[in-house]
Image: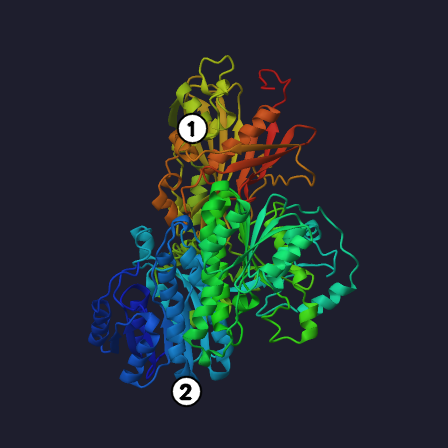
Amino acid sequence: MSAELRFDDQVVVVTGAGGGLGKAYATFFASRGAKVVVNDLGGSFKGEGQSSKAADVVVDEIKAAGGTAVANYDSVEHGEKIIETAIKAFGRVDVLLNNAGILRDISFKNMTDQDWDLVMKVHVKGTYKCARAAWPYFRKQKYGRVINTASAAGLFGSFGQANYSAAKLAMVGFTETLAKEGIKYNIISNAIAPIAASRMTETVMPPDVLENLRPEWVVPLVAVLVHKSNTKETGGIFEVGGGHVAKIRWERSSGLLLKADDTYTPGAILKKWDKVVDFSNPQYPTGTNDFLGLLEESLKLGPNDQGEKLDFTGRVALVTGGGAGIGRAYCLAFAKHGASVVVNDLVNPDDVVNEIKKLGGKAAGVKASSEEGEKVVKAAVDAFGRLDIIVNNAGILRDKAFSNMDDSLWDPVLNVHLRSTYKITKAAWPILLKQKYGRIINTTSTSGIYGNFGQANYAAAKAGILGFSRTVALEGAKYNIYCNTIAPNAGTAMTRTILPEELVQAFKPDYIAPLVLALSSDKVPKNPTGYLYEVGSGWCGRTRWQRSGGVGFPVDVKLVPEEVAKNWSKIVDFDDGRADHPEKAQDSVAKVMENISNKRGASKKVAGGNQYLEAQKKALAAESPATEFAYTDRDSMLYNLGVGAKRTELAYVFEGAEDFQVLPTFGVIPQFDAAMPFNFDEVVPNFSPMMLLHGEQYLEIKKYPIPTAAKTRNLAKLIEVVDKGNAAVLKSGVTTVNAETGEELFYNEATVFLRGCGGFGGQKKPADRGAATAANAPPKRHPDVVVESPTTEEQAAVYRLSGDYNPLHIDPNFAKMGGFKVPILHGLCFMGIASKAVYEKFGPFKNIKVRFSGTVLPGQTIVTEMWKEGNGKKVIFQSKVKETGKLAISGAAAELVDKDAEGQNSKL
């Protein structure tokens, strides 16, 4: 092992150090020789109250262990007092860990200004104030280390956390700017997105999970980042918790380049939308795209193919900062396409209003600060009776090197950009909810995404807007309220001060507006909400996160910084084929949860002998004891209702109907109580039921008509276990027979994905077993049939009465622990809904196979697309969630019953 990383004679300031992660930092750094300032206001995790006790307890603990520490009880908004404590007590400051935080979780529609402002004050202003107070000392001594705390909620958005998401992504833009300004002075700044048990998380996670999310799993990464040996890793974003450490960076699509002239229209962009989101040849940027080069290329192109012309007639669009520059271009473009436009500007909205009216358009002006959200939105509704589209565009610059930044420069920029975006959106939200329609375009910038010299304030505000937008997109999607974020590059009054005049003229705001109109329309073909786009010079592209494969450390061995340092090259490696693209907070949690079953003890056992392969061999040869399952007409009707049968469909809900029947996918129900001839923890290492994902289901119906009541016997078997390295794939089968006649009724195969359970030396590829394993790629043509099946808010509650009592589908707390805002629909339930659509369009099928590709929330609509193939004997299908456009079922097919076959009845 490499030499111990020490912090002797260094002074470490930790905010929010009275408990949780902050306490773990404080005690660790003291144990490694640092002098520690333990700051804690002593309030609740909601930011209420104050007490010196929390900090004092930690200081006493450090001193009792032979360390050196002092307490500080100031709020982080008085960062200068916290740093002053370090200077008075120890004469210097070397490391600043901005860790203090509060939660004020509440749905956006119920959020108050107090909920917003308090979270901003602690997370954003507090982090800025502490860093700003430490900065002169860092520069003078040419040494400083800063850690700012982001979160998965900031990176991806999170229901009920619009304030927190905004604050936490603001930390990323702020950190990237500090990194760029500080590197020449040996000041290293990084951001972490930790998943750790704390007062904030203990209310939503069970004790066994919390045990593996101890703050001690986060500390070693931070120790490596702030050690003097780290002189290059700066401006980074790291996901960490539960033994998992990975790095996150930006990835930019190659994008769409069109000619920047009058033919550059919203329709031209939408016609080639696939190129906008094409990541086949991505960039990994740390700054703005080459817009000058792109403009030169653009001007060489021929006129653009025109797609459909967008029509905004009847829509009302509000543009803040609409009196000049990009805002004016937006207003004119919306008016040209038929919208009624509300021009909001603090200085002069009237010129643009008159310009629109002279062109025959409809417009009204609102002279007010965009911070006066209620006033601006009310004026819009007063003028035109409704509001459909919001473009939050107002902005100011107060650029200054961070060493010269002060509150008079910080506060106005945060208020005009971030708080006004919140205020306008908040004021409009009830209107958009009521009409179940809204389009919101918020404005970030490349400074926010990548950081920029002299713009710590602007970068924090602009990154915060992106975090805010992602939560708004999540909360609005089910109400047909879409929210996207753009980072525009254009010559304006703001950029005129920093760009030559000929470039200002070339980078016309007119080349931003077409993307804004496209995103504000109903025409974006897929994934219409929650995304980030960069745009300018006739080019537009999407920017997303890329995450390294990272390293999962065994959770049964204490993690130390030296072990993290030893594995550093793997933690930051994006090119080893393991990198992925997380899009939601659950993706962050999933990596951590996957690692919870990673135990060194288990892997040693495997190395010493093939106990898992032996157990698999034994299980493959074993016969399971038969289990009995009886069902009645009542159970058949209950199942039919659970997969979407309506009261008008008497064949499914009335036992007296002439053609009373149970839907064929009822065949998945009798298998629930089957006794498997093995235990999961015997055939794979590190098994945890929380790490099990239901991947695929295959069902054969052996006999039609299916009895609507029967006594059955069920026999289970292991089919195969595939070793995927980090995970295992296990396939099991269950045969269901009629207990009275011995006749086979159903045969099921379930494929489950077991995260963290691989590496046992088993077979690497699954066997081909025909229909049960077929890939079933959809044909490259429009579907032959499309069926929309709305689900109800009660769908999961009804379906579970057929026997699947997993609390994930009914208990909100359990669902939240799994990373879901609300309980999700059973996979076998939406399999049943999709299969019902196939059955009703094409008749009985002898087998059906589906792959579960995504989640469905009760109340969403399932859209099943079907193609008839194989001489009409096979139906390939897939199912999407209408509200999100994302796949829920893929690789699916049903082989149809031969209608003329003897003994078969057909529904057609």
For residue 54, which quarter of the picture? Answer: bottom left
Q: Quadrant of the C terminus?
A: top right
Q: Residue at x 50, y 69 (%)?
A: 458
Say whether residue 234 is visible.
Answer: no
- The circle on residue 503 is none
Residue 138 placement (x, y as % from top left): 41, 83
What residue is rendered at 52% in x and 68% in y?
396
Q: CA distance from mark 2 to mark 1?
A: 72 Å
The answer to whether residue 400 is above or below residue 524 is below
Q: Could you say which is closer to the camera, residue 507 or residue 174?
A: 507
- Indicate how the structure is coloured in the image: rainbow
Marks 2 and 1 close (CB-CB < 8 Å): no
Mark 2 surroundings: few (<14), some (14-19) or many (≥20) residues within 10 A: some
Comparing 305 with 201, the one in front is: 305
Q: Nearer the viewer, residue 241 or 386?
A: 386
The location of residue 803, given as percent across then percent down, is: 39, 31
Q: How far from the left and from the top, in percent, is residue 423?
A: 45, 57
Q: Nearer the viewer, mark 2 or mark 1?
A: 2
For label 2, the residue is: 141
Please state, as top left, top right, bottom left or bottom right, where the N terminus lies in the image. bottom left
The x and y percentages for residue 570 are: 50, 67
- Disc 1 residue type? Pro
Q: Amino acid at mark 2?
A: Gln
Q: Which residue is mark 1?
A: 670
When the figure is inspected, residue 248 is found, relative to residue 665, above or below; the finding is below
Residue at image position (47%, 19%) is 707
Is residue 663 placed above or below 569 in the rendered structure? Answer: above
Q: Secondary structure at mark 1?
A: helix
